Amino acid sequence: MVYATLDTPKIAPHALSVRQLAAVVAGNALEFYDFLTFSFFTVQIGHTFFPGQDEDTKILSTLAIFGVGFLTRPLGAYVIGRWGDRAGRKPAMFLSFTLMGIAILGLSLTPSRAAIGIAAPILFLLFRLLQGFALGGEVGPTTAYLLEIAPPERRGFFVSLQFMTQDFAVLVAGVVGFLLSDYLDPGALDSWGWRIAFLIGAGVVPFGLIVRRSLPETFSHPTPEKTRARTPGLWRLALLGGVMLATVTITNYTIDYMTTFAENTLNISTRVAFGATVMIGFWATVFDLVSGSVTDRFGRKPVMIASGFVFLALVLPIFYAVITLKSTAALLIGSALLGTLQGLYAPPILIGVTEGLPREIRSGALALVYAIAISTFGGSTQFIVKGLIKLTGNPFAPAGFMTAALAFAVVAMFFVRETAPVKTGDLS
């Protein structure tokens, strides 16, 4: 059993089994698995829905649909996230997971353009919009739930499970892509192989829906006076948190583009490219938990600033080695380093922003800040990166984009306040 107390005296402490805790984070893992699978199979999806165009146009068209899916995230955050602050975290998590399951099945089963014509990419787009709506409503309630179900001295570790599950999804998606590319010929991968990757994710839906129904609720309705009393300063936190979460998004989706980058720009085989994804997912998964645990001991702010500076210093050298050497070893080692840096960098930011929000508006506020940041930059990052490479002819465009984003984030970090109980002494 995983024992956890809540950050409010109004609700009795609960004990979550590992199975229940897995159900909380399964939604995040599933949704990011599906989002990332879409990203990883950009080339194959482009062949299915945009035949007859040159390779770069196919990829850009597919990435455009990928990006459009982010437009509905703020709407999902507003609707489902705010519902989590009214009806409770549990019903909000159940709704977002249900919608995600529908979207996954739709994406995996949409016929090709050769079969039904222009209706194919239109249907695919509609399911992407639904997927974005669901994910926009998933992050706020589940992250708030993890923070509230955790003992105060372990909040960092519990909230780091959000990014850990995202990166574990990268690992699983990379393994699935590696196996499919290894066992299927290019024709089979184009016609139906990529659909298998989506359907594998759909298998998690029944488990998540069943177990989430058994979760204890962590939310109680506050008094209006308490809500108004804690409102000042929220706009400052929202602005700084939005900047930092935007850079997490930019670095995350640029790194996750490594599969397509290796295959399309560096002309490295698909099999090896998916090996890079496995390395990114594995090392990020490990260091997400390390980072979360370290913040519980030393505070959120010192860890985010230190990791931010190291990340900023190493991005260009890593990309230089990968691009210059163009070897399997350079790609895999570079990917492992990028995954490690992302794992150290991202969790303290999410933990600090979540912890700094008043409990009574935590689900909706976090959902909106996160959704606005990720819809602005997550939906556009891979499209921008590919567009910059094509426009400039320079494969260093991803590194430059990441470096600029990290520079803004490091500056913002100095202006956020520390929220960790080990530093503030607040164990409420």
Image (cartoon, rainbow, N blue to C red):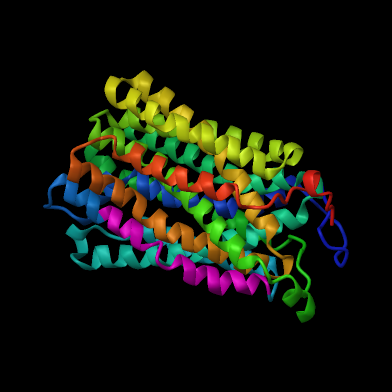
Can residue 209 be seen in this snapshot? Answer: yes
User: Residue 76 in the image: x percent, y percent?
Assistant: 51, 69
Image quarter of residue 256: top left
User: Residue 116 in the image: x percent, y percent?
Assistant: 21, 65
Residues in magenta?
62-85
Count of numbered badges drawn on the protein:
0
Image quarter of residue 118: bottom left
User: Residue 104 in the image: x percent, y percent?
Assistant: 44, 58
- Asked whether 79 falls inside the magenta stretch, the response is yes
User: Residue 17 in the image: x percent, y percent?
Assistant: 77, 48
Q: Does residue 397 appear to the left or right of 140 in the view shown?
A: left
Residue at x-position 29% and y-position 50%:
384
Q: 131 or 225, which is in the foreground?
A: 225
Residue at x-position 24% and y-position 57%:
112
Q: Does residue 410 appear to the left or right of 378 in the view shown?
A: right
Look at the magenta stretch and give its main secondary structure. Answer: helix
Q: Does residue 5 appear to the left or right of 120 in the view shown?
A: right
Residue occupying the far bottom of the picture = 224
Q: 315 or 68, which is in the foreground?
A: 315
Residue 388 position (above or below residue 120)? above
- Asked whether 130 falls inside the magenta stretch, the response is no
Residue at x-position 47% and y-position 53%:
246
Residue 330 position (above or below residue 392)? above
Q: Quadrant of the C terminus?
A: bottom right
Q: 218 or 324, which is in the foreground?
A: 324
Can residue 195 be seen in this snapshot? Answer: no
Residue at x-position 19% and y-position 42%:
392
